[in-house]
Image (cartoon, grey):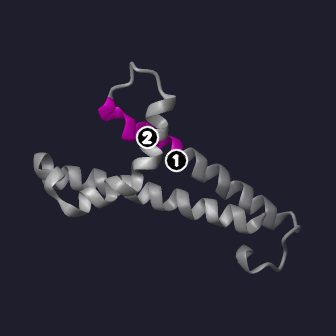
């Protein structure tokens, strides 16, 4: 169970950093961001998450808001996984496991 939570936490962390990197490149590159190789790479990494959120949200949510909604949802999921992982380690069920250090 601990390995699954660690893996899930890592996947969420990578997606969060990808969306955060996109936001910074949006600020730095402006309108020319679509021609930036790194922006396109970060967008490719985050695409499965933004695609899923786009399918779950109603049509009233604008397309340019979807990455922000995705980021917020991923932060909440990351916090839940982190607290569950900490709870698993603290309750003593996984005491002494390398993943709990």
Look at 39% across and 24% down and name the residue there: 61
Which of pointers 1 and 2 indicates the residue nearer the eye?
A: 2
Tell me the CA gap for discs 1 and 2: 13 Å
> Quadrant location of residue 71?
top left
Residue at left 72%, top 69%?
Answer: 3
Residue occupied by mark 1: 74
Is residue 100 rendered magenta in the image? Answer: no
Rendering quarter of residue 50: top left
Residue at 80% from the left image edge and 62% from the top image edge: 88
Residue 92 in percent (x, y) is at 88, 68
Question: Main structural element of the magenta stretch: helix, strand or loop?
Answer: helix
Range of the magenta residues?
A: 63-74
Q: Is residue 55 above or below residue 87?
A: above
Q: Is residue 64 magenta?
A: yes
Q: Which badge, 1 or 2, comes first in the chain's sequence?
A: 2
What residue is pinned by disc 2? Answer: 51
Q: Name the image quarter holding the N terminus.
A: bottom right
Quarter of the figure with the C terminus: bottom right
> Dot 1: few (<14), some (14–19), or many (≥20) neighbours within 10 Å?
some
Residue 41 placed where, x, y %?
30, 60
Secondary structure, mark 2, is helix
């Amino acid at each position: 169970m601990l390995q699954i939570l660690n893996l899930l936490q890592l996947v969420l962390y990578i997606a969060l950093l990808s969306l955060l990197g996109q936001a910074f490149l949006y600020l730095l590159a402006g309108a020319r961001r679509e021609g930036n190789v790194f922006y396109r790479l970060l967008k490719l990494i985050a695409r499965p998450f933004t695609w899923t959120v786009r399918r779950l949200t109603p049509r009233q949510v604008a397309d340019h808001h979807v990455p922000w909604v995705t980021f917020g949802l991923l932060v909440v999921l990351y916090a839940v996984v982190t607290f569950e992982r900490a709870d698993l380690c603290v309750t003593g069920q996984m005491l002494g496991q390398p993943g709990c250090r």
